[in-house]
Image (cartoon, rainbow, N blue to C red):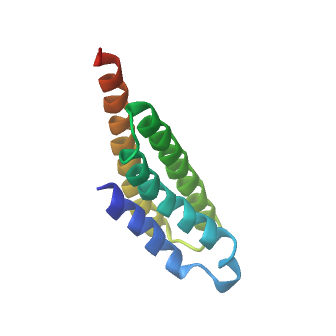
Amino acid sequence: MILPACSQGILGTDAFPKHELYGLTSQARRAAFSVTLNIAEGSAKRGDGEFRRYLDIAIGSITELQVALRLARDRGYLSNHDWDVLERLRNHAGALTWLLYKAVSKRKRQEP
C-alpha cells in the first residue's frame, strides 16, 4: 500500500506548471520516491537498527511530501478534491510506515 500511495503522489505532480519542474515538482517527486526507496534499502540492511534508521528517513520523506502537496494545493496546482485523495493515501502510507517502524523497534527489544 505504501508504493501505490507514493506513486499517486508522483502522478499528482503531472499537472503542476512547467515553471515548477525544477522546484516544487522535483521536490515532491523526490520525496515520494524517497519513501519507497528508503524502505526497500533499509529492509536489505543488516540488523534492525539500520532498518529503523531508514524507516525514520522514509517517515521524514512522507512528511516532506505532505508539505509539498499542501503548497501545490495552496498555489492552485492541485484541486481540493485531488489534494484530499492524495492526502488520504499519503496519510495511510505514513501510518503503515509508522506501524512497521514500531514493529521493528519491538522486535529489537525482544531479541536476546
Which image quarter: residue 21?
bottom right
What residue lies at 44% left-to-right and 68% top-to-bottom?
Answer: 82
Image side of residue 18 versus residue 98, left or right: right
Percent across and percent down for residue 32 are 49, 61
Quarter of the image for the C terminus: give it: top left
Picture quadrant where residue 49 is located: top left
Furthest toward the front, the residue is 46
| Number of marks | 0
The residue located at (36%, 46%) in the rendering is 43
Q: Position of residue 45 (x, y in %)?
A: 41, 44
Q: Is residue 76 left or right of residue 91?
A: right
Quick check: 20 left or right of 28? right
- Classify 26 as above or below 53: below
User: Which residue occupies the foreground of this view, 59 or 88?
Assistant: 59
Could you say which is closer to the camera, residue 9 or residue 43?
Answer: 43
> Relative to 44, does residue 102 appear above or below in the rendering?
above
Quadrant in which the N terminus appears: bottom left
- At horizontal 41% and vertical 62% (from top left) the residue drawn is 6
- Residue extending furthest top? 112
- In this view, 103 is above or below 95: above
Q: Is residue 73 above or below residue 98?
A: below
